[in-house]
Amino acid sequence: MDRDNALRLGYTPALRDSDIDSPMLVESEDCPASVVVLIKFWVDSARIQGRICTTLYGPGAAVLSGTDKARIAASYAAELQELRRRKAAENKVAASPTNYGRNSSSVQLWTHGDDIMHFSIL
């Protein structure tokens, strides 16, 4: 959320990737594969958002030409599209009824609401 808000409001994010050293979730009885796929997507999206903030809105952005900024933005958009494509492929496996378990409605809500986040970044 920090990066989403920073990009929309034009300010520097409060959290940097280097501030976060928690291990990535792994599938377990308490954490189905569908949740791991979703959280990993969020983390990977946030990493790209951090690079967007640094590259296109950081101090070094002032020396970039409009053409360079457009090229860089297009490359980040392509990365986000590839990330979303990979998540969709992983979800076909992870989102099976056997992997949803007791959290099925909340996982489905996250998965579908996740598309809104993706397109709002682009």
Image (cartoon, rainbow, N blue to C red):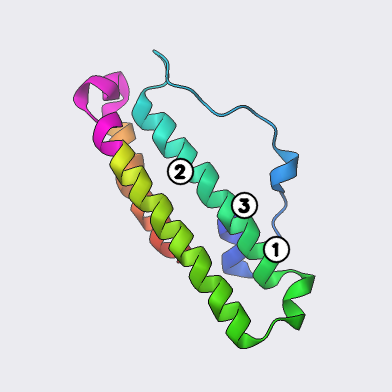
Q: Which residues are magenta?
A: 91-104
Q: Amino acid at mark 2?
A: Phe
**Mark 1 crowd level (few <14, some 14–19, many ≥20, 10 Å Cα):** some
Q: Position of residue 63 (x, y in %)?
A: 76, 82
- Residue at 39% from the left image edge and 13% from the top image edge: 29
Where 85 falls versus 33 (above or below)? below
Our reading of the magenta stretch's main secondary structure is: helix
**Mark 2 crowd level (few <14, some 14–19, many ≥20, 10 Å Cα):** many
Q: Which residue is mark 3?
A: 2
- Residue at 44% from the left image edge and 64% from the top image edge: 78
Residue 54 shows which numbered tag?
1
Callout 2: helix, strand or loop? Answer: helix
Q: Position of residue 94 (x, y in %)?
A: 30, 30
Q: Residue furthest left?
A: 97
Q: Amino acid at mark 1?
A: Thr
Q: Which of the 4 image quarters holds residue 11?
A: bottom right
Q: Residue furthest right?
A: 59
Q: Are marks 2 and 3 in contact (CB under 8 Å)?
A: no
Eye-nearest disc, 2 or 3: 2
Residue 41 shows which numbered tag?
2
